[in-house]
């Protein structure tokens, strides 16, 4: 009897349509434990006054959300985050796109350059942030020392200057991330049939015209993926800000994730308020993702 039941179960899961669920079950379990559960937990905690020590936990409803809408520092953090996205994403994707069109071939030089550009991607943002903080730091930095020799105005302090801190963060982020976009776009270009490029060259199209009227329209499916994932990653920027400026000077580089960390694990230990900000960030990212996806889908329809 037991053997008969076991045979029925085995026969059921041996069917192709059923066996597929067994293969995706581990991935779905991981997603559930590390994505769905934390998301639901964040929303539940956001409705309380919980701190990191979990003392005197009380249900306070949507008070944390109301408080966040009235706090100027939250709006400033969101403003800096949007500023980071608007500046870093176009530069990163534009640079990756140009270099991908230049380096998509399979010759040794192109392979070497792609490998070199990808090296920063495998390095952690924290280590790169520390390196650049020292390089541009006024105490031991080589670059400020060279600038002082040229200008004769003393050693500049780039990280404590509102004019330079944010551009430096943009520079570090683009330098670290564009190699990943480059590799994806190179793969996308290589998936385009060579016949399209040959037809364009036969018709007398220049290299720029081939890039504008053949490569980009045919590359839109890959490019849309790169745009969406880059925007999502940029909205969650944290480590480079935390390591280099900590949100300063004068909160001019403080992003929303940096502020969430400071409220949840800083001096206040206000997990309830930090969770409310996390939930707000989730819905903002979801909205931006949907709008970005609609835009890229419309562009693909226009180019099809």
Image (cartoon, grey):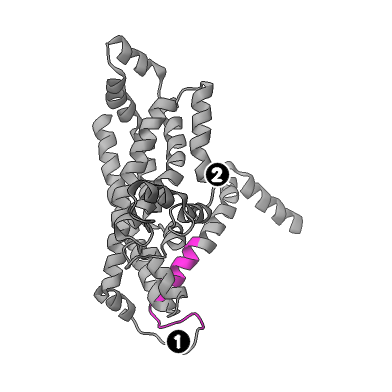
The quarter of the displayed image where residue 122 is located? top right
Residue at the spot x=39%, y=64% of the render?
Answer: 257
Measured from the top left, where is residue 141 in percent x and y? 47, 53
Q: Position of residue 16 (x, y in %)?
A: 58, 42
Q: Which residue is mark 1?
A: 57
Relative placement, left or right, of 127 versus 156 is right
- 39 falls in the magenta region: yes
SS class, disc 2: helix
Q: Few, some or many C-alpha atoms within 10 Å of disc 1 (few <14, some 14-19, many ≥20)?
A: few
**Magenta segment:** 35-53
Residue at x 51%, y 24% (from the top left corner): 109
Is 85 within the magenta?
no
For the residue pair 280 and 162, the one nearer the viewer reads as: 162
Residue carrying label 2 = 17
Q: Secondary structure at mark 1?
A: loop
Q: Is residue 117 above or below residue 80?
A: above
Query: Which label was assigned to residue 38?
Result: none
Task: Label the magenta part by its dominant secondary structure.
Answer: helix
Q: Is residue 1 visible?
A: no
| Location of residue 221 by image quarter | top left
Which sits in the foreground, 275 or 143?
Answer: 143
Residue 46: percent from left, percent from top: 39, 76
Q: Callout 2: few (<14), some (14-19), or many (20+) C-alpha neighbours within 10 Å?
A: few
Q: Does residue 247 appear in this view?
A: yes
Quadrant location, the C terminus:
top left
Q: What quarter of the picture does the N terminus occupy?
A: bottom right
């Amino acid at each position: 009897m037991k053997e008969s039941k076991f045979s029925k179960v085995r026969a059921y899961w041996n069917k192709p349509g059923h066996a597929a669920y067994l293969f995706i079950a581990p991935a779905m379990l991981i997603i559930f434990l590390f994505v769905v559960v934390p998301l639901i937990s964040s929303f539940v905690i956001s409705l309380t006054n919980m701190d990191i020590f979990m003392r005197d936990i009380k249900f306070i409803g949507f008070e944390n959300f109301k408080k966040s809408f009235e706090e100027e520092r939250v709006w400033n953090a969101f403003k800096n985050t949007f500023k980071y996205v608007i500046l870093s994403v176009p530069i990163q994707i534009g640079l990756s796109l140009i270099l991908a069109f230049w380096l998509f071939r399979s010759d040794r030089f192109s392979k070497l350059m792609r490998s070199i550009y990808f090296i920063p991607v495998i390095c952690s943002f924290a280590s790169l942030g520390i390196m650049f903080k020292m390089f541009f730091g006024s105490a031991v930095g080589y670059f400020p020392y060279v600038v002082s020799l040229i200008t004769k105005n003393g050693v500049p302090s780039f990280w404590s200057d509102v004019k330079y801190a944010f551009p430096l963060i943009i520079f570090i982020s683009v330098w670290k991330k564009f190699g990943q976009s480059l590799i994806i776009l190179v793969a996308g270009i290589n998936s385009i049939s060579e016949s399209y490029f040959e037809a364009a060259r036969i018709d007398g199209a220049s290299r720029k015209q081939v890039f504008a009227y053949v490569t980009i329209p045919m590359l839109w499916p890959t490019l849309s993926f790169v745009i969406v994932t880059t925007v999502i990653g940029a909205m969650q920027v944290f480590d480079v800000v935390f390591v280099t400026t900590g949100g300063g000077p004068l909160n001019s580089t403080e992003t929303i994730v940096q502020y969430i960390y400071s409220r949840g694990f800083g001096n206040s230990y206000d997990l309830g308020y930090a969770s409310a900000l996390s939930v707000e960030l989730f819905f903002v990212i979801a909205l931006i993702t949907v709008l970005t996806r609609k835009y890229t889908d419309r562009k693909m329809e226009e180019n099809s």
